[in-house]
Image (spheres, grey):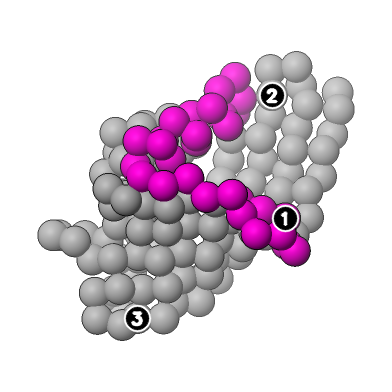
Amino acid sequence: MVAFYELTQAKAAYCRNLDNRDWDALAALMTDDVAFGMSESDTEPETTSGRDATLTLLQSLVVGTRTVHQVHTPEISLRGNEATVIWAAQYRTVFENGTSVTGYGHYHERWVRQGHGWKVASLHLRHLLTDVTQS
């Protein structure tokens, strides 16, 4: 139960730090060699490797936007100091021109316990549905 709590707190902090553009706090939640990818439900993701490359990609995806990322109903599998987690996810991105994107899907992640906390080692966002609204 302790690991479950710690993982849910770490993921909540990940979402909050991304939405608040707190890049240092977000970086502190990642391993040095984190792997990051996104895909549609039936395609393989293009993966970025490494913390710096992942942060650069995330920054480029949210520049000039306001975002809200929410996750819930985690499926957590623990193996010692490693966990695999699938989170149901919803996010909304609003661009400066008023266009908005709302996405639904699942994060497929691997977390490792390092030092005093959990860090994400791989993260793949698999989109199931994406709604785009033009203003």
Q: Does residue 117 show up magenta in the picture?
A: no
Q: In this view, does 92 lie to the left or right of 36?
A: right
Give the residue drawn at x 48%, y 50%. Answer: 36
What whole-number distance in Å separates the C-alpha atoms at marks 2 and 3? 38 Å
Dot label at residue 95: 2
Q: Which of 33 and 10 is in front in this view?
A: 33
Residue 40 disc label: 1
Say which quarter of the image contains residue 133: top right
Mark 3 residue type = Leu
> First in sequence: mark 1 or mark 2?
1
Within-10-Å neighbours for mark 2: few <14, some 14–19, many 20+: some
Residue 127 in the image: state x and y as whole percent. 70, 56
**Disc 2 on helix, strand or loop?**
strand
Magenta span: 38-66
Q: Is tag 2's residue or tag 3's residue first in the polypeptide sequence?
A: 3
Q: What residue type is labelled 1?
A: Glu
Indicate the quadrant where residue 23 lies.
top left
Q: Measure how far apart labels 1 and 2 are at the Cα level.
A: 21 Å
Q: Is residue 130 visible?
A: yes
First in sequence: mark 1 vs mark 3? 1
Q: What element carries label 1?
A: strand
Q: Which residue is drawn at 81% across and 45% down?
A: 131
Q: Quadrant of the N terminus?
A: bottom left
How many callouts does the rendering have?
A: 3
